[in-house]
């Protein structure tokens, strides 16, 4: 399992745990002191990333699409911050 | 005439009841069973709360909490881990309808509107407080209050801390640190970045004096009149149900 911590400019912290298989996300857990509204979207968002290549641009687009589809709002961390942290966790594996 | 909101002072309770009552009030508000509400409370025993998206085992030294008799609980709101000291902290919560004319749709802006009550209250004590987005209040650059908001069932539910005293040593004995080597460094950095009412003013401000100041602050910031009220039977019953959730391992360790 890969782990990474990424400090967003301005102070919030993202922590990721990543299981990948053949360069694709098998399971990802996105933790930290950011805000996502509504909160219970986080589990679905993690699921929506399953199967995606561990690639920053891919992951960012998936997150953006998921949020706009579900009316989710991130605060204190952006989709690209989260994507960056997931890729960092992939590199740690 | 100013709009009337309910003021609750629910005193000191354990972490599980505190979080359960907050959610119960927000639910009651969403069903229109109670007016818009501002609540003050404290934590007995002292407690650590973590944000909705945090991992309990990553952030909190659970064994240290147990041995010091400190509660630990996951909040319904995002944000970071907080040490709520019984003597050091006053906590507030606000439950207001999302479509209230004072509440911007934009979450970031609404932090500013609701935090203005705290800012005005602190200013009336002689503390030049300022709102610092996203969710902090600072004095001369040092944090004195942290806030977190959720929106559920058409209700804005914001809670936050106001530091009367600050003790980073105790705080870091309860929170996980990346390594023992940097524990002292972290303590020092919090001492530099965080302040408290008593520290800033160099005198002891009682909880009563602080509450009175914040009540006036909220009244002026939101153009309301706060009227002392009671927790309803519905809220009390729902809170005792929700307390089971907040004290469960399933909830507290779910991430």
Image: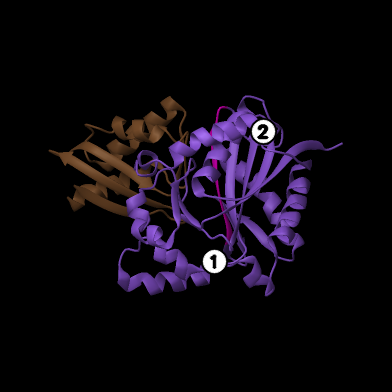
* Residue at the disc numbered 2: B232
Determine crowd level at label 1: few under 14, some 14-19, many 20+ residues with C-alpha closer than 10 A: some
B95 or B65, which is in the foreground? Answer: B65
Horizontal relation, residue B189 to residue B44: left or right: left
B188 or A90, which is in the foreground? Answer: B188
Q: Chain of mark 2?
A: B
Residue for point 38% across, 36% down: A42
Q: Quadrant of residue A44?
A: top left
Coordinates of residue B18 in the picture (x, y in percent): 55, 45
Is B147 within the magenta? yes
Horizontal relation, residue B123 to residue B87: left or right: right
Which residues make up the magenta segment?
Answer: B144-153
Q: Secondary structure at mark 2?
A: loop
A8 or B26, which is in the foreground? Answer: B26
Q: Secondary structure at mark 1?
A: loop
Question: Disc 2 versus disc 1: distance between alpha carbons?
Answer: 37 Å
Tell me, by letter, which chain the rendering colours brown: A
* Residue at the disc numbered 1: B194
Q: Chain of mark 1?
A: B
Q: Quadrant of residue A57?
A: top left
Coordinates of residue A1 in the picture (x, y in percent): 18, 47
Q: Is residue B175 visible?
A: no
Mark number, residue B3: none
């Amino acid at each position: 399992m890969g782990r990474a911590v990424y400090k967003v400019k301005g102070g919030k912290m993202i922590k990721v745990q990543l299981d990948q298989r053949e360069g694709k996300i098998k399971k990802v857990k996105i933790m930290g002191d950011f805000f996502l509204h509504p909160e219970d979207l986080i589990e679905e968002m993690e699921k929506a990333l399953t199967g995606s290549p561990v690639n920053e641009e891919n992951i960012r687009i998936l997150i953006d699409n998921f949020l706009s589809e579900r009316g989710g709002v991130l605060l204190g961390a952006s989709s690209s911050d989260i994507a960056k942290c997931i890729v960092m966790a992939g590199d740690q594996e | 005439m100013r709009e009337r909101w309910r003021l609750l002072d629910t005193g000191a309770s354990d972490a599980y009841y505190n979080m359960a009552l907050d959610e119960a009030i927000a639910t009651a508000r969403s069903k229109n069973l109670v007016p818009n509400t501002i609540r003050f409370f404290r934590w007995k025993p002292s407690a650590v709360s973590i944000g909705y998206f945090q991992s309990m085992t990553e952030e909190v030294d659970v064994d240290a909490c147990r041995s010091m008799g400190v509660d630990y609980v996951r909040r319904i709101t995002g944000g970071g881990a907080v040490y709520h000291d019984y003597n050091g902290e006053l906590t507030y919560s606000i439950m207001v309808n999302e479509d209230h004319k004072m509440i911007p749709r934009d979450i970031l802006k609404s932090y500013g509107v609701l935090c203005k009550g705290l800012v005005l209250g602190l200013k009336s004590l002689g503390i030049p407080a300022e709102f610092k987005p996203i969710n902090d209040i600072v004095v001369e650059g040092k944090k004195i209050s942290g806030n977190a908001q959720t929106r559920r069932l058409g209700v804005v539910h914001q809670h936050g801390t106001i530091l009367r005293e600050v003790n980073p040593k105790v705080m870091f004995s309860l929170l996980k640190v990346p390594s023992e080597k940097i524990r002292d460094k972290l303590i020092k950095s919090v001492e530099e970045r965080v302040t408290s009412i008593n520290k800033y003013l160099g005198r002891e401000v009682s909880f009563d004096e602080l509450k009175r100041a914040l009540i006036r602050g909220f009244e002026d910031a939101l153009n309301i009149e706060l009227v002392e009220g009671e927790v309803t039977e519905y809220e009390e019953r729902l809170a005792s149900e929700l307390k089971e959730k907040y004290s469960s391992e399933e909830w507290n360790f779910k991430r």
